[in-house]
Image (cartoon, rainbow, N blue to C red):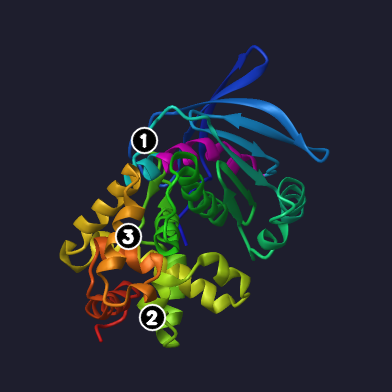
Amino acid sequence: MPRVCLAALAGWWRAAPGALVVILGVAGCASTPARQPVATVVEPWSYAGVQGSKIVTDHFELYSTLTDEELQEALPGFLETAYEQYTSLLPPRDEVNPRMQSYVFRDRRQWEQFTRERFPGRYQVYRQIPAGGYAHGRLCVVYYLRRAYTLSVLAHEGMHQYFGSHFDEVLPAWLNEGLATYCESYDLPKSGPRFTPRRNTFRMNSLRDALIADSVIPLRKMLATDAGEVILQGRTRLTTTYYAQAWAMTVYLRHGSGGRYAQGFARMLADVSAGELARMAQSARIRAPFPSQVSYGEAVFRAYITDDLDAFETGFLDYMHELAGFKKR
C-alpha cells in the first residue's frame, strides 16, 4: 500500500472574479524542498442535490463531492504529477488538447447513479467493478475508498483516461493494464507526489498469493486475455492475479533481466505514439509459425519483445519470485 502523508497540507488563497483561485502545495513525509505549487480555479458544483466543487488545473477539470477536505486539496497537485508520469511513458502527439474530466464521488451510491445516467448502455458492465472506478475516453469516474486507495485508483484510471484523450490506437490488454498498474504506486513527500512503480505493494501482495497458490496465468493466456472479460467472470482471485501480473510484466520489461527487454519496450511505446503499433503487430503475426493462433496481444509482444515465449516465460517467472520477495527457484 502506498505510503501517504496528507496530515500537513499547505495552501494559500486569494479571491478572483467569479471563482476562487487556489495555489496548493502538498506537505508531508520528507524534508526536501516543496515542488512548484499548482495553480487551480475552484468553483461551486453540485450533483443530485449534493454540494461539491469543480477544480480546474492545466490538464484536468475535477468534479468532486468529497467530504475529506485534505484529500481534495491534494488532488490537483497529485493529478498534475500523474500527468507528468503519463507523458514520460507516452509523450502526447499534440499537447493542445481539451482538459480531461475527472469525477470523484464521496460514495459508491453517487458513483452508480452518475454511471447509470451517463452510460446507461454500459451500466451493467461498470457496476460489476468491485471497487474503484473506470475511464471512458476523456472521462474518469471514481469514488472514495480511503485516501491511499482513492489516489491509486485515480492514477490507474487516469492513465487510461490520458491514453483515450491522446491516442487512437488499440492497445493489447496486457500493455494497457500494465501501464495503468505501473502508475498506481506513489509517495507523498514534502516535495510533492513521486511515483514509485517498482514498489506497488498492493499488486505485490496479490502476486505473492498467486505464486504461493501456483495460480500464475500462463504467458500466452496472459497475452491473449482481455481485462474486461476477467472482471465480468466475477472471479476475484483471477482478477487480482491478472492485474498483479500485468504490473509485474511492465516492471520486468522496463527494469528486469539486466535491461534486456527495455529497448524493445521503449520502441513499442514510441510506435504507440507514432501510430505504428497495429502495423508492426500484423507483420509479427504473419511471421509467427501458426499465425491464425496468435492473438493481437501476442502479436504485439512478438513484434517488440521476443518470439521465444517459452524462454521469456521462464525468466519472467523467476523475476516474479524475486519481485515478491521469494528466493530464486
Q: Can residue 252 be seen in this view?
A: no
- Corner quadrant of residue 88: top left
Question: Residue at 29% of width from left, 56% of height from top?
Answer: 280
> Is residue 82 inside the magenta stretch?
yes
Q: Which SS does the magenta portion mostly show?
A: helix
Q: How many labels does the image show?
A: 3
Q: Distance between the residues labelled 1 and 2?
A: 35 Å
Q: How far apart are marks 3 and 1 (CA)?
A: 21 Å
Amino acid at circle 3: Ala
Vertical side of 191 occupied by 14: above or below: above
Amino acid at circle 1: Arg
Mark nearer the N terminus (3 vs 1): 1
Disc number at residue 93?
1
Amino acid at circle 2: Pro
Q: Is residue 85 left or right of residue 102?
A: left
Look at the image and give the residue range highlighted in magenta: 68-83
Mark nearer the N terminus (2 vs 3): 2
Nearest the eye: 127 or 183: 127
Q: Do the residues labelled 2 and 3 touch (CB within 8 Å)?
A: no
Disc number at residue 216?
none
Q: From the image, which quarter does the C terminus lie in?
A: bottom left
Question: Residue at 31% of width from left, 67% of height from top?
Answer: 285
Mark nearer the N terminus (1 vs 2): 1
Residue under label 2: 218
Vertical side of 180 occupied by 6: above or below: above
Q: Is residue 141 left or right of residue 246?
A: right
Residue under label 3: 281
